[in-house]
Image: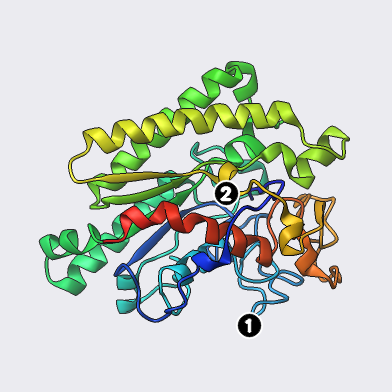
Amino acid sequence: MACYLKFWFMVSLNLLPLVFGVPQVPCLFIMGDSLFDNGNNNNLVTAAKANYPPYGIDFPDGPTGRFSNGRNMADFIAELLGFDEPIPPFATATGREILTGVNYASGAAGIRDETGYQLGDRISLDRQLLNHQTTVSSIAFLLGSKEAAANYLQKCIYLVNIGSNDYINNYLMPQNYQTSFVYNPDQYATVLTQQYSQQLKALYSCGARKFAAFGLGRIGCIPAEMANSGTNGCVETINEDVQRFNDRLKSQLGDLDRNLSGAQFVYVDMTAISSGDPSTFGITVTNAPCCIVSTTVAKGQCAPNQVPCNNRDIYAFWDAFHPTEIASELLAAGTHSYLTPLIT
């Protein structure tokens, strides 16, 4: 599972290109955690899944595995780019539909393989990369050769939004993980982004050329972390740790952009996107979840079959970690200017 933020939105819905069905790029590949997961965890043995009510209460197909009351950020970004259908999850993608892209994201996943283990199975970024290799082989078969697949993939955009769980479900859980004893915050941000950089290089070696890597949001401002600290305000020490990660990620992406031939790396600044006053968009509840959350293994996720708030458009958070559909739409709109350099 992942996070977002204390939503101070300074985004304009005028950024939304309302020309659906005419994709601005031929394909979109998505990697990450529960902010982007649209069903990959449904059949895993894990507490990190969202294929039960009240998740999906506002989604046409009901609970699908999205950690939201409706669509998630990945869905809205696909719409922004002109796709008329959500990018299918790897768990169910078949046939020629993979040519429009695949969503590999997994709730509780992290950059580090051990991240999220206390919740059960999850598809770490390393495993998502292996799944993408399978997809690349299938695309080569569909297009007739490895060369044709390589030419095709270099036109695709790759969204990667991961790292939140390496804090929420790793570094900030000393009862389960040793990382906070082994590394101070500076060291952890460094080793984490160094590993992330190697993973992005591996994705490059599979043919990816256009990358949008998302910075982390203000994890200290999500309801789960505020509850853990016993405060109604943001936990600024956590936000400072996350900013260390973001600063190093920006630097790593700059190095990759300079050193990998033909590659474009864009840093998506989620802190900047989420700055501003959310009440401008009618969002007035920013420190509490809309649904009744579980206190058991899936602590902070929606408790099954409970009735959520009925005024969902005024809430920033759906559960104690994830944004509501309206918040996801606004966050996605804010990514548009960052993705523009990748659309050619």
Q: Quadrant of the C terminus?
A: bottom left
Eyeballing the image, is 97 above or below 116? below
Eyeballing the image, is 53 above or below 330? below
The residue located at (35%, 49%) in the rendering is: 211
Q: Which mark is residue 273?
A: 2
Local crowd size for mark 1, using a 10 Å CA cut-off: few (<14), some (14–19), many (≥20): few
Marks 1 and 2 close (CB-CB < 8 Å): no
Disc 1 versus disc 2: nearer the observer: 2
Residue 315, percent from left and from top: 78, 61
Residue 48, percent from left and from top: 65, 55
The residue located at (64%, 27%) in the rendering is: 240
Disc 2 on helix, strand or loop?
helix
Please tell me how many numbered marks the rendered image carries. Answer: 2
| Circle nearer the N terminus (1, 2) | 1
Eyeballing the image, is 69 above or below 118? below
Q: Quadrant of residue 236?
A: top right
Disc 1 on helix, strand or loop?
loop
For mark 1, what is the residue? 60
126 vs 53, left or right, is: left
Q: Quadrant of residue 69?
A: bottom right
The residue located at (61%, 43%) in the rendering is: 217
Residue 108, can we see it?
yes
